[in-house]
Image (spheres, rainbow, N blue to C red):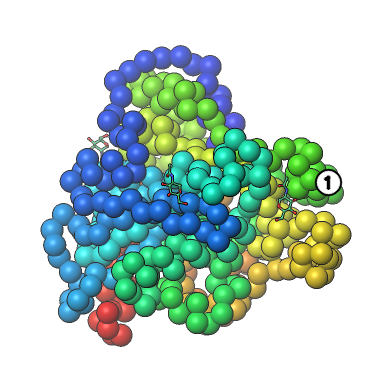
Amino acid sequence: MRHFELLLAFLFIIGGSTREIEEDLDTVDIISHYGYPVERHFVTTQDGYTNQVHRIPQGRDSRTIGGCSKRPVVFFMHGLFASSFEFVLNLPSQSPAYVFADAGFDVWLGNVRGTEYGRNHSHFSPKEQQFWNFSLYDHSHSDLRSQIEYVLKETGQENLFYVGHSQGTAVMFARLAEAEPAWQNKIRAFFAMGPTAGFIKPDLPFELLENHEIQRLIQFVLDGRFGIIPINIPKPIVSALADVCGQHFLTHFCASAFYLSAGREKLGQMNETRIPVFVSHFPSTTSTLNLLHWVQIFKYHEIRHLDLGPKRNLQIYGQTEAPALDIGRINVPTYLYYSHDDRVTDERDVNEIIIKRMGPALKEANNLDHFSHYDFAVGLRATDEVYKPIIYQIYKDIENDGC
Ligand SMILES: *[C@@H]1O[C@H](CO)[C@@H](O)[C@H](O)[C@H]1NC(C)=O
Ligand SMILES: *[C@@H]1O[C@H](CO)[C@@H](O)[C@H](O)[C@H]1NC(C)=O
Ligand SMILES: *[C@@H]1O[C@H](CO)[C@@H](O)[C@H](O)[C@H]1NC(C)=O
């Protein structure tokens, strides 16, 4: 990913500065630092991973939503190289987790395996290769599914509202594409920010990788010959980077790196003062195999099961090709928030891959001006242009169809 190279470019600049307190706190501590009630939950998947799910059961006052005996649940899922932290990176009026809690919802923030909140397995340590033998499909089929089911059980609700960002939308597209109608009913509405279900654009470096070598590499990885390894930048380096970006004369420079990597948007949506906080928590970790699965999403222009090569495909899927996950099967009301200024998921990807392929479940496709890929989580205009419209849509839904 391009932002990776740019972040790495700063590694050689050394500096020191005052640190913002949030740089050293985890998601739960930061929520509590801002005076919100918070809970840490542990959800174990059938294949042995225990991921943390963070909950803000109510906002700073005890408001509820018109006539509902329990606060409706809004579940958030983060993007690639992020974690639940991406929803609490700004001030309370600007970060979706708090905005939704203060609007009267019971807010849950999911985390997938491999992130700092998903490094616990019943048999494998994160030091072992087997721990990192997962990809997007496992996030969708196991992490996401187990967390949704857990939250419904814990709250006694029949369904919940789902907000995903980037990979957090891909995992829900994949889940709903394969889920039975009874499971789909657990999701009352799906709000997709920076929605990603495939790419058609030709100008990303991934294009270069669209060749047979990738398949060979995947065979190597699966055989344990290449090594299934986590992809991350060591914490001390990230800390140094955060310090560097915290220096006033460099803040603009660091901001430009974010802008360049995620979109053409340069109109000042990002709070540049917060960049050290963003950098200290980003990127989080994922597996090599997940990145290879993302490469396949570029290659096939859609989300499929992991392509294991003809021989293994035949053994596991009963066919030589990796089965596609058809988003036309989705019947959950879906609302898209995307931007023609987002360089990761652009307008064409959304039109050709999501809008044209989804059936009547697609309710709205909102094309916003001047949002980069990150702005859906950290942009200063996101509260007014994305979070509030989602909240009004949910209020309307509850007014029409009950709690
Ligand atoms: C790891 O998960 C198990 C449940 O599978 C839990 O009992 C344990 O507390 C977790 N450990 C950590 C360090 O989170
Ligand atoms: C990774 O998992 C697949 C099945 O999902 C298995 O066939 C393969 O042997 C595993 N590889 C390693 C190195 O654990
Ligand atoms: C940017 O963040 C700082 C705190 O890090 C805060 O004091 C300031 O008000 C924020 N600016 C805007 C425009 O929200």
Q: Position of residue 104 (x, y in %)?
A: 21, 65
Specify the quadrant that holds the C terminus: bottom left
Q: Nearer the viewer, residue 105 or 311?
A: 311
Q: Is residue 141 above or below residue 25?
A: below
Name the residue type under label 1: Arg
Does 339 sit left or right of 32 as displayed? right
Q: Quadrant of residue 312?
A: bottom right
Q: Quadrant of residue 125?
A: top right
In the image, the residue with mark 1 has its CB under 8 Å from the nearest atom of ligand 2: no
Which residue shows up at 49% across the image and 40% down it?
A: 284
Q: Is residue 299 above or below residue 251?
A: below
Specify the quadrant that holds the N terminus: top right
Mark count: 1
Q: Position of residue 226 (x, y in %)?
A: 76, 37
Which residue shows up at 30% across the image and 85% down it?
A: 401
Does 300 sit left or right of 87 as displayed? right
Which residue shows up at 46% across the image and 33% down it?
A: 256
For mark 1, what is the residue?
Answer: 216
Q: Position of residue 64 (x, y in %)?
A: 18, 69
The picture quadrant for ligand 3 comes to top left
Which residue shows up at 48% across the image and 57% down it?
A: 44
Q: Nearer the viewer, residue 155 or 345?
A: 155
Does 263 sit left or right of 191 as displayed? right
- Determine the secondary structure under disc 1: helix
Asked if residue 225 can be seen in this view, the reply is: yes
